[in-house]
Amino acid sequence: MMKHKDEWDDFILAVQTSYGFNKLCCPMIFTVEGQLIGDTKDFTNYAKDHFGKEYTEAKEILIKRAKEN
């Protein structure tokens, strides 16, 4: 269901509460069936476990993140 931008804060809080998140994950990734996978790290593990696929980030992204930290 589409949400108006003014509804997002309440929606995110409701999802966070219903799934017992201690912190807000971003992005929130769901399966086609509507099951919450979690954040990017959880999706990476899900893809590896279910499909045998490993995610590797582009070198440019890794360099950018290293400079930010």
Image (cartoon, rainbow, N blue to C red):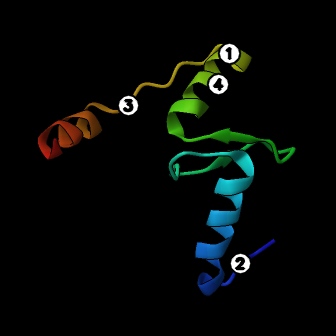
Q: Which residue is mark 2?
A: 3
N-term-proximal mark, 2 vs 4: 2
Depth order, front residue of 8/52: 8
Q: Kindly indicate whether the residue at mark 2 contacts the one at mark 1 (C-beta within 8 angstroms).
A: no
**At numbered mark 1, what does the secondary structure look like: helix, strand or loop?**
helix
Q: Residue 47 shows which numbered tag?
A: 4
Q: CA distance from mark 2 to mark 3?
A: 30 Å
Q: In which quadrant is the C terminus drawn?
A: top left
Q: Residues within 10 Å of mark 3 (few under 14, many from 20)?
A: few
Residue at image location 51% in from the left, 32% down from the top: 41
Q: CA distance from mark 1 to mark 4?
A: 6 Å
Q: CA distance from mark 3 to mark 4?
A: 14 Å
Q: Residue 9 shows which numbered tag?
A: none
Depth order, front residue of 64/38: 38
Q: Residues within 10 Å of mark 2 (few under 14, many from 20)?
A: few
- Say which of marks 2 and 4 sits in front: 2
Amino acid beneath label 3: Glu
Q: Which residue is mark 3?
A: 57
Q: Which residue is mark 1?
A: 49
Residue at image location 60% in from the left, 18% down from the top: 53
